[in-house]
Amino acid sequence: MKEYAAGMKALLLLVAWLLVSGSGAVQPATAPTAEALPNSCTAGEEHASVFTPYALASGRPAWAPLELIWGQLQYRSALESILLDGDSTARNRAALALGLIGAQESRERLATTMTQAENDIRPWAGLALCYLGDPRGANEARRLLTTGEPWVRYYAVVGLWRLDSPEARSLLKKSYPTQEPFVQAIISQALHSAPWQPPSRAQTRQTTFTLTPNQLWTEMASQLDLICDYWWHQGDYEQCCRIMETAIFFCPQRVDLYDNIAWLQWSLGHDEVAVRTLNRGLSNNPGSWHAHFNLGWHYFNTKRYAEALPHLQAAATDSNEWCEPMHLYAHTLERLSRGQEALRVWEDCVERFPEDVVGKRNLERVRQRYSGSQ
């Protein structure tokens, strides 16, 4: 079974007590005309779950971030330390995270970072300021709205909407024609939504956690996993991809995230985009057999067997705990009319995984089919 489906089932089991699906699914974001949009877009009350207070907080528009992370101030001290002393990548992550958790007390530190630090962190500090409702970050949010990846541009739109100023709305209107449909839809809805109201302080947690940077990024990605599950239940797969890209920003070693995004991209008809996503996962994790397997599986699923073969061979060679890469590698060899090689792979598979019933059955099948052939 596809890794995405297995992972999502596991996550649903984990949070089943949290979530109750609504009766109707919301379609992925498209680019509606201004006339077609309602004056306010409030999250549906039919999604009755522990997320409801966050989904409906302060009349939250349905397109806006689910404020599950906002108020997680136990991470603020550690994030500020990284903002001061971390490497470039860590500082970028810390800046965005301070915005996502609603660290209003960090605004001056973010403003100082934006004006005094190296160029690559300035957009992230500015974005965080906008996310906190501070207009000092507007120019950097505008910059990201032009140069950022779609998931980054989403946060830039949110930040400018939160400023609720004529200048910010003008920036959004001017940017609209150059954006892709997902971002256009977010801009359209932002321009029709009521001004932002920060979530209640009652949602905050004040206990300070002492965590290493890697532990912090893992925590952020785990929170984003839950938010992704919310959007999945809403049927908004563009938002699912956006959330998982945010998680990758914090944890690029999470090869499952690239696979999940690619599966959704492929299912939405964007096959080459999915391939690029999987190649990015492999590039960021060159020693991961799982990343090779994900790309090989996608090529196999789309009948690009010759392209699948080297990745499945790499996965089959290095995977010592899971027999599925060897299965798919052998099937690919058969699709390429290399039956004798497939036979040897099935033999190796049964030797490595003696309890593999599927492997044994396929070994007998291939032996009968290719018996005596050279």
Image (cartoon, helix red, strand yellow):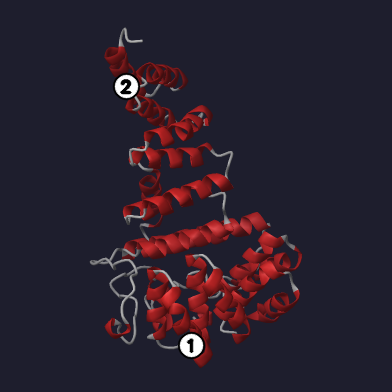
Q: Nearer the viewer, mark 1 or mark 2?
A: 1
Q: Is residue 274 above or below residue 106?
A: above
> Residue 163, relative to residue 316: is it above or below?
below
Q: Residue furthest left?
A: 23
Location of residue 278 in the rendering, given as x and y in whole percent from the top left corner: 47, 47
Q: Amino acid at mark 2?
A: Asn
Can residue 210 be seen at all in this image of the molecule? no
Q: Give the percent coordinates (x, y) of residue 206.
A: 61, 73
Q: Quadrant of the N terminus?
A: top left
Residue at figure coordinates x 30%, y 20% from the top left: 361
Q: Amino acid at mark 1?
A: Ser
Task: Name the residue beneath numbered marker 1.
Answer: 170
Crowd around label 2: few <14 · some 14–19 · many ≥20 (10 Å)? some
Instruction: Determine the image quadrant of residue 210.
Output: bottom right
Residue occupying the far front of the picture: 178
Mark 1 closeness class: few <14, some 14–19, many ≥20 residues within 10 Å: few
Picture quadrant where residue 84 is located:
bottom right
Q: Is residue 315 left or right of residue 338?
A: right
The secondary structure type at the circle numbered 1 is: helix
> What residue is shown with label 2?
362
- Give the vertical position of 235 relative to 262 (above or below): below
Position of 123 compared to 171: left or right? right
